[in-house]
């Protein structure tokens, strides 16, 4: 009898530990209902436009997913000579952050694209519908993020023990091609924002030089050094002039912004 009770107690604790390890929710830097709004400024002083990122929990083909929408548009004087109206959407897995569907519809000064990409993980093929050029394409892939899911994937990376010069690398699927994308850690800094002094981590993403950016190392971003990992400031040297984005408002974060 005693042996049976002892084994029962051991079994109970074993099941408890397994449940704790495998059934707990994964800690995430974001959740459904989060909304980030950014003020865009051209050459440091001229209001250029607005960018908004929203994320919600949904179902897609029977799977639990996050649906995120990113929109951006120009305003004021900038709109007179260079009008931007961009919309991006991504449906990605709630647990793995693997993208299932990505939509891109942009109009940047007459430069237009309208594409929908579906990711098939049984065949490891991405099916791209190009509505602008009336052309469909299939591209094979292994492990990729789309342009929006990469933002959330990178926010979930563990950066606690990163040292200056360390890098995070992913493969990003953009249009019909796969690009190696990486972020280099530059250090930590306390910066002034409209929300007060914020502890930040500084990163430099390597971007494509050419039509938009002046060089590969043209962009610097500051993200909150807390559980949210929210970008609060972004600076970019463009082919002509420079662009700055600053967090203007937020809601639905997983935790409060940590002030200095």
Image (tube, rainbow, N blue to C red):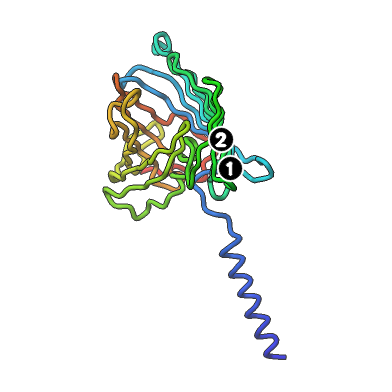
Q: Compared with residue 78, is residue 44 higher up or lower down, i.e. above or below?
A: below
Q: Compared with residue 53, is residue 226 higher up or lower down, i.e. above or below?
A: below
* Residue 173 in view in this figure: yes
Direction from residue 28 to residue 58 in the image, left or right:
right
Q: Give 21 or 246, whichever is nearer the viewer.
A: 21
Q: Return the residue at label 2.
A: 127
Q: Give 212 or 132, whichever is nearer the viewer.
A: 132
The percent position of residue 44, horizontal first and vertical second, equals 31, 22
Element carrying mark 1: strand
The percent position of residue 101, horizontal first and vertical second, equals 58, 36
Instruction: Name the residue furthest right.
Output: 1
Q: Compared with residue 24, is residue 131 higher up or lower down, i.e. above or below?
A: above
Q: Quadrant of residue 172?
A: top left
Q: Give 5 or 136, whichever is nearer the viewer.
A: 136
Residue at 31% over, 45% down? 185
Element carrying mark 2: strand
What number of labels is visible?
2
Q: Compared with residue 111, is residue 199 higher up or lower down, i.e. above or below?
A: below
Residue at 33% over, 52% down? 162
The disc, 2 or 1, on the residue closer to the chain's N-terminal end is: 1
Q: Return the residue at label 1.
A: 120
Looking at the figure, which quarter contains the C terminus?
top left
The percent position of residue 231, horizontal first and vertical second, equals 41, 37
Q: Give 154 or 31, whichever is nearer the viewer.
A: 154
Q: Mark 2 and 1 residues: CB-CB less than 8 Å, in contact?
A: yes
């Amino acid at each position: 009898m005693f042996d049976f009770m002892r084994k029962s107690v051991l079994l109970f604790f074993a099941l408890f530990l397994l449940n704790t390890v495998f059934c707990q929710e994964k800690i995430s830097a974001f959740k459904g209902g989060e909304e980030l709004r950014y003020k865009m400024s051209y050459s440091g002083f001229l209001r250029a436009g607005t960018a908004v990122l929203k994320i919600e929990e949904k179902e897609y083909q029977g799977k639990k997913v996050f649906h995120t929408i990113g929109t951006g548009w120009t305003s004021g004087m900038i709109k007179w000579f260079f009008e931007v109206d961009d919309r991006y959407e991504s449906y990605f897995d709630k647990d793995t952050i693997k993208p299932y569907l990505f939509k891109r519809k942009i109009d940047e000064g007459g430069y237009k694209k309208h594409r929908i990409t579906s990711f098939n993980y049984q065949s490891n093929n991405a099916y791209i519908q190009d509505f602008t050029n009336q052309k469909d394409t299939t591209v094979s892939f292994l492990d990729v993020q789309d342009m929006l899911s990469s933002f959330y994937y990178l926010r979930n990376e563990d950066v606690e023990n990163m040292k200056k010069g360390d890098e995070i690398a992913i493969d990003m699927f953009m249009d019909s091609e796969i690009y190696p994308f990486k972020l280099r850690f530059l250090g930590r800094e306390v910066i002034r924002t409209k929300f007060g002094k914020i502890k930040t981590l500084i990163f430099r993403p390597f971007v494509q030089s050419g039509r938009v950016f002046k060089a590969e190392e043209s962009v610097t971003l500051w993200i909150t050094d807390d559980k949210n990992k929210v970008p609060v400031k972004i600076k970019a040297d463009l082919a002509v002039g420079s662009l700055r984005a600053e967090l203007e408002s937020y809601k639905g974060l997983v935790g409060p912004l940590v002030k200095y």
